[in-house]
């Protein structure tokens, strides 16, 4: 294996991306803030101010270090996530069939692929069982291709039926897919609306910074004639305007949120999916294994020969045992589906000799028809051919050509069992075909009706609570299943699904025109007897109605709807590889309760991101006004703050934004509120007004301290000290106030957030160091000030930044 890997490489495709911390460093040194600091450093050294220039170099390294730390932290979270979401394959290793990561496969491996899996590498078919592959990704041909022993297969294609053993002949970049450079991992993803909003906002602020830079430089140069000093003040304002914390915060929130979800058993393909969860308005869920328990049991058998319905608790007549036997023969030889496992267990209990004997499959007709049926032709130990079918009762009754009275009796019984929550299958025996050949279609056999099997699949213990949690969060739940309408509605009622009496079948969905379907889907909670095209139409109709749709699924037939939904959710345990590849989320434990956790995390992330961005806007505004108002108003003391002061504030604001707010716990009411409107901007309307009001309040407080100290004739160094202290203390108050836009400060103080208190403690320690350490005072051009003066600064900060508390109080009354 090691020699093969050394010769052929790992089974991975080259994907463009950043190369670890070096890539992060490259991004950091090209950021606008880094370039502005670099320019300020150069100016200080050119002006002979070595001490200030050296300080900015240290600050430059600190800013770069924080950015690199955040980038590496996010990258590590995403790398761990990619490891968890990595596809796996079944390979024969050391005499056993084991699950191995796809990237660990080597040339020469024997690999088993089954219906619903994606082929992990190029290979040759050794043995096949009704094996067909979708090669559209390579050829564009939509029709599946049957594969026989000796024929080649290719990485990236999907098994649509049957199973096969392959011997791998090429891996990674040496596969056909690798050579033509069409790795699925390399396909770009569209930015989410929130990403686009963040990008637009930062771009606009950057252009505003360019304009302000030119204005301040021009005014200072006109007044002083000193181009270097004027340029330095212009750079100071540009640094104060640029909100470079926002992109860092966004990427950190998404990556760390995805990592948190992975620990809760929810894997995300793209971190940006996390924020979309908070806006989900509809979730379409499967019944079997999602709302109901994954295991199934055969509870009753209808003996068509005797016309009796029998429980499995006691002995069965031979004709009833034949129903179980033929149902078992119509299943996979080694069943993996819960329903087929239940049929095998029931057959083993009542006909152990049949299960113990070998009845090899001679020919297979895969699940087909609407509603579906499947047929297997097997050879008995005596050499006789046996034809067994199982499937939807309507299909089985139709091909058996029962007398109208008998057919009506079977349908009535099916409805009665379905209404009790049982899943009902029809079972039939076909006339043995000649050895010359088999009919082209399974319906062409001469069929005899044997009976029905009723399988129990009760709801999960937490299903009702999950449905209720979604309802409280304002999210509609719709059940989409291939089962009988009566069965689906019975389960829906048992779990308390709102609107369980409303129903559309797959045939209804396809028969309705687009406009009518859009009207009907909103008020319908149960969709039964569904198939891929119908599921896809329902998802698209809901999207056309403006809903944000999450869709759960596990099979190949769910893949189109999973791909079409805003949030496709695949089951990690029983789900097929095709479903997992089509989905954007994977539930590791097949537990729908994980989706409640995921929605709550999505809402928490968006809520905290809103707090962080509001904080950034609110604290940047007073810095901007503190630099510009004295200059434009012609105050005697202007240009008090320089790059060294702004970078100090940046070092405080960056970690507070991307670390402290990211770690903020969810507010208690968030899962009782309706989903946010996906088109709503994170700083639109009332949110923007609130941020501007907070920023203007802080600016008023800082400028009041500035103006009062200036009018009292205080020297420039003292005014600078008081203004800077007020800005830093306002930052502390603003951070505490913005922890919640609804709860008062006295309540949020009790909410645990260790990182937030650490950031605020560091902020106050840095302020005290700048004011109390002589070397730092000299660097910042500060002077000692009395404690009473700092008390006035604290009061101004409390009044300026604490205005939101008054708003919260008035809103609650």
Image: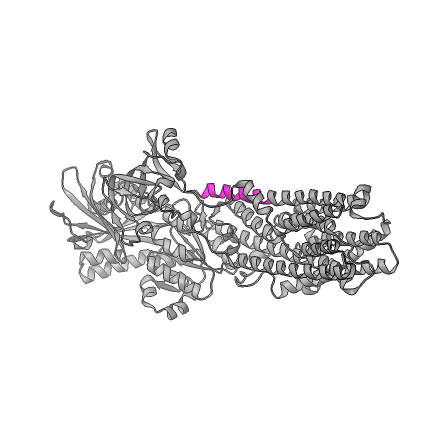
Secondary structure mainly formed by the magenta segment: helix
Residue 426 seen in this snapshot = no
Identity of the residue furthest to the right in this view: 713
With 229 as the anchor, is 596 left or right in this view?
Answer: left
The region drawn magenta spans 69-85
Q: How is the image coloured?
A: one colour
User: Is-magenta flag for residue 80?
Assistant: yes
Where residue 200 appears, x then y in whole percent?
57, 60
Q: Residue 228: x percent and y percent?
A: 73, 53
Task: Report the side of 440 relative to 548 (left or right).
Answer: left
Which image quadrant: the N terminus? Answer: top left
69 in relation to 582, above or below = above
The mark tally for this picture is 0
Residue 70: say if magenta: yes
- The foreground one among 349 and 143 is 143
**In the rendered view of the protein, which quadrant contains the C terminus?**
bottom right
In the foreground, 749 or 327: 749
Residue 191 in the image: state x and y as whole percent: 50, 56
Residue drawn at the location 21% of the way across and 52% of the way down = 304
Query: Which quadrant of the view contains residue 318?
Result: top left
Q: Do we see residue 227 in this rendering?
A: yes
Q: Could you tell me residue 741's position as x and y percent?
A: 65, 59
Position of 193 with respect to 690 (left or right) is left
């Amino acid at each position: 294996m090691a020699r093969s890997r050394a010769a052929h490489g790992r089974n991975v495709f080259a994907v463009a991306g950043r190369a670890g911390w070096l890539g992060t460093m490259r991004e950091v040194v090209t950021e606008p803030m880094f370039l502005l600091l670099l320019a300020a450093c150069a100016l200080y050294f050119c002006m002979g101010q070595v001490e200030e220039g050296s300080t900015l170099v240290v600050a430059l390294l600190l800013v770069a270090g924080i950015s690199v730390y955040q980038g590496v932290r996010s990258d590590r979270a995403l790398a761990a996530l990619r490891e968890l979401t990595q596809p796996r394959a079944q390979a024969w290793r050391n005499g056993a069939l084991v699950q191995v990561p796809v990237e660990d496969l080597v040339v020469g491996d024997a690999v088993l692929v089954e219906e619903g899996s994606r082929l992990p590498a190029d290979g040759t078919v050794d043995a096949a069982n009704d094996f067909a592959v979708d090669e559209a990704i390579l050829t564009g041909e939509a029709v599946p291709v049957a594969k026989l022993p000796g024929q080649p297969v290719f990485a990236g294609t999907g098994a649509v039926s049957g199973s096969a053993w392959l011997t791998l002949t090429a891996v990674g970049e040496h596969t056909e897919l690798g050579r033509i450079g069409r790795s699925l991992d390399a396909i770009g993803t569209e930015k989410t609306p929130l990403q686009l909003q963040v990008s637009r906002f930062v771009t606009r602020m950057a252009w505003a910074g360019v304009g302000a830079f030119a204005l301040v430089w021009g005014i200072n140069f006109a007044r002083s004639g000193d181009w270097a000093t004027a340029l330095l003040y212009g750079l100071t304002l540009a640094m104060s305007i640029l909100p470079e914390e926002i992109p860092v915060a966004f990427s950190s929130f998404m990556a760390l949120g995805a990592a948190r979800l992975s620990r809760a058993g929810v894997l995300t393909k793209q971190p940006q999916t996390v924020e979309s969860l908070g806006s989900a308005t509809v979730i379409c869920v499967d019944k079997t294994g999602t709302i109901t328990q994954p295991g199934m049991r055969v509870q009753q058998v209808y003996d068509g020969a005797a016309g009796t319905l029998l429980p499995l608790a006691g002995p069965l007549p031979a004709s009833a045992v034949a129903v179980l036997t033929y149902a078992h023969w119509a299943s996979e030889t080694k069943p993996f589906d819960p329903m087929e496992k239940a049929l095998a267990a029931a057959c083993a209990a009542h006909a152990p000799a049949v299960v113990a004997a070998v009845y090899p499959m001679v020919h297979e007709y895969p699940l087909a028809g609407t509603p579906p049926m499947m047929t297997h032709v097997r050879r008995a130990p005596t050499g006789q051919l046996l034809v067994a079918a199982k499937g939807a009762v309507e299909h089985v009754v139709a091909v058996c050509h029962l007398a109208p009275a008998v057919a009506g009796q079977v349908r009535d019984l099916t409805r009665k069992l379905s209404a009790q929550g049982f899943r009902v299958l029809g079972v039939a025996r076909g006339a043995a075909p000649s050895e010359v050949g088999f009919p082209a279609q399974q319906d062409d056999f001469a069929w005899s009706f044997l009976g029905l099997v009723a399988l129990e699949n009760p709801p999960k213990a937490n299903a009702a609570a999950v449905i209720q949690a979604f309802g409280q969060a304002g999210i509609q739940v719709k059940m989409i299943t291939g089962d009988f309408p009566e069965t689906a509605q019975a389960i829906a009622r048992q779990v308390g699904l709102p609107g369980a009496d409303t129903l559309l079948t797959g045939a209804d969905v396809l028969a309705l025109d687009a406009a009518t379907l859009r009207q009907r889907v909103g008020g319908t909670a149960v969709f039964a007897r569904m198939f891929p095209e119908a599921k896809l139409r329902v998802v698209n109709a809901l999207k056309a109605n403006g809903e944000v749709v999450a869709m759960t699924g596990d099979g190949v037939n769910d893949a189109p709807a999973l791909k079409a939904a805003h949030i496709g959710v695949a089951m990690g345990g029983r789900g097929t590889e095709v479903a997992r590849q089509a989905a954007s989320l994977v539930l590791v434990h097949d537990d729908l309760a994980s989706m409640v956790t995921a929605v709550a995390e999505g809402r928490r992330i968006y809520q905290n991101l809103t707090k962080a961005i509001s904080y950034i806007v609110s604290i940047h505004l007073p810095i901007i006004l503190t630099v510009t108002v004295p200059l434009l108003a012609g105050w005697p003391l202007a240009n008090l703050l320089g790059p060294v002061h702004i970078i100090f504030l940046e070092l405080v604001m960056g970690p507070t934004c991307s670390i402290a707010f990211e770690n903020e716990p969810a507010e208690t009411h968030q899962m009782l509120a309706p989903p946010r409107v996906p088109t709503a901007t994170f700083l639109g309307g009332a949110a923007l007004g609130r941020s501007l009001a907070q920023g203007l309040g802080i600016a008023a407080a800082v400028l009041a301290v500035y103006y009062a100290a200036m009018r009292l004739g205080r020297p420039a160094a003292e005014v600078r000290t008081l203004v800077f202290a007020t800005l830093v203390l306002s930052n502390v108050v603003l951070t505490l106030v913005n922890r919640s836009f609804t709860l008062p400060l006295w309540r949020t103080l009790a909410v645990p957030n260790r990182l937030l208190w650490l950031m605020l403690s560091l902020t106050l320690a840095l302020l005290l160091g700048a004011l109390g350490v002589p070397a730092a005072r000299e660097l910042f051009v500060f002077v000692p000030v009395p404690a009473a003066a700092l008390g006035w600064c604290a009061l101004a900060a409390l009044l300026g930044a604490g205005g939101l508390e008054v708003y919260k109080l008035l809103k609650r009354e």
